[in-house]
Image (cartoon, rainbow, N blue to C red):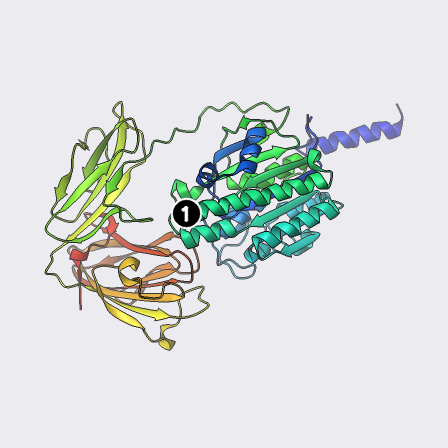
Amino acid sequence: MSFVLVLAIGILSLWSCANPYMEKRDFEIQHIIVIGIDGMSPNGIQKADTPTLDSMIQEGAATMHARSVLPSSSSPNWASMIMGADTEQHGITSNGWEKFDHQLPPVVVTQYRTFPTIFTLFKDQQPEALVGAIYDWDGFGRLFEKADVDFDIDGDHEDKTTQEAVNYIQEHTPKFTFIHLDHVDHAGHAQGHGSPEYYRSVEKADSLIAKIVKATKDAGIFETTMFIVSADHGGLGFGHGGESLAEMEIPFILYGAGIKKGYNIEETVYQYDNAPTVAYAMGLQTPQAWIGRPVKGAFLGNEAPKLTYKPKEQITQPKILPDAGYFEPAGGVFKMDSVAVVMQNPNTIGEIRYTIGNTFPTLENSKVYEDTFYLNQTSIIKAGIFQNDQLVSTVTEGSFRIVSESKEDPVKFQVYQASGMEKLPDFTSLNSTYEGYITEFSHKLALTDDMPQEQVVVVFESYLEVLKDGTYRFFTNSDDGSKLYINGIEIVDNDGDHGVRERSGSLELSKGKHLVRVEFFNGGGGYHLDVKYAGPDIPKQIIPANQLYRG
């Protein structure tokens, strides 16, 4: 054996040891196309007419239970999708992030001072590969370095974006293409997730995906192309950003070259597994700072992983009526002596058991729900589905705030209009356009149909009666930003352009009345606000109207 051959074998062995993805393969993948549909939930695919996606699922590998990262907002999730890491690593924690304007620095950086993306890996390890990013939302373009891609275009509309992608694929047959489409998210914000318009937007996404697949056939690369179709988040009502499954679960579909047919992905898949899966398919070495893992079981020649712990079958939590709407507990505020509580079991199995107060329902401390019952004072209800004496669902909560009919509305509110808001404005330059009194800190009570709904700010003030000295924690849960002040001191900073997100802060309060001020804005799209507190002998709850007073 010649010295040159021995040296070559030695170098190859060293490379194989250094690169964990240099494994024996039963597949050949020469091109990869990732198609990300902003705001497309599994529900959207399941209920809309989606022949292309249905075919990809049947002929490929898929799960409808992949998970977004928190918060379930666009920027953190698109970043995690292309960076193989979570918000804690890459530092893109909200839609307000900018390259040189953020609070949490990335754990590692490239020469451009940003966290490495899948585009970076191609640039560093396969510099000869043609790589393109084509996106509908211009915010996606700030998440990666332009120097890492050969083709970068903001399509500005789903049809134009798709056509740009088709042209690029047919003309250049790139090794890796990332395509972002935004119109499904627009429909969710404008008409609501689960609305007929939302499902029609998913159907349009399906037709656009079909055009992209056809482009690979026309370019003669279909047989060697692997596709990934996924989303950044789902949605609930007119928004997203929270922790519900409707917001957190996303589809993850692998299709084409190298992928098993009809494979049901049972292993857990997270948003940050997308880029490592691309890296695995292309033999790229991932950085140590990435935490994602490739979904190896979906590839030809690989065994399905043996799962010690398997996904739990989801039993739907009970429904408590009256329903208060999205992002807040059932119940509401009632000016009456008593209110009826109704519960429903949406499953065909189990029974509803509930508690009144801050107690988590167990078999020992809960009651079986049998029929409508009445509350005559402010109360919290927690309920779950029990089967074989075990809690088998998540727990749902109801918050019933009962206030005397004779009590005057205690919360003063003022509405302001501004423009171009990405955070709360300076109020010294604004004049209120509406003002009045309402029962509690509520976006629904303040922003009625005859008032502006976008580029609007609301300021609430009321005095909270504290019955006992101690430490109190306050929470705002809002879309977009909010702040909370007690006696003029900022306690909660939840400002910025973001989806539904909760932030909190605490302080010591003495017995007596204390001024609570809440500032809230909505830049555009869906919006929400609820304000909660917890304290000595007080479970976390929406601040009840019976504890609020005018000055």
* Position of the C terminus by quadrant: bottom left
Residue 285 percent across, percent down from the top left:
66, 38
Quadrant assignment, res 275: top right
Q: Is residue 408 left or right of residue 395?
A: left
Binning the other alpha carbons within 10 Å of mark 1 as few (below 14), some (14 to 19) or many (20 upward) gives many
Q: Identify residue type, mark 1.
A: His
What is the secondary structure assignment of the residue under circle 1?
loop
At 58% from the left edge and 30% from the top edge, which residue is drawn? 60
* Position of the N terminus by quadrant: top right
Residue 284 percent across, percent down from the top left:
67, 38
- 458 or 307, nearer to the observer: 458
Residue 421 percent across, percent down from the top left:
44, 66
- Residue 348 versus residue 378 in the image, above or below: above
- 102 or 10, nearer to the observer: 102
At 36% from the left edge and 60% from the top edge, which residue is drawn? 482
Q: How many marks?
A: 1
Residue corresponding to mark 1: 193
Residue 233 visible at all: no
At 63% from the left edge and 45% from the top edge, which residue is drawn? 118
Q: Is residue 405 left or right of residue 206?
A: left
- 320 or 521, nearer to the observer: 320
Residue 366 percent across, percent down from the top left:
19, 32
Residue 62 visible at all: yes
- Residue 416 versus residue 512 in the image, above or below: below
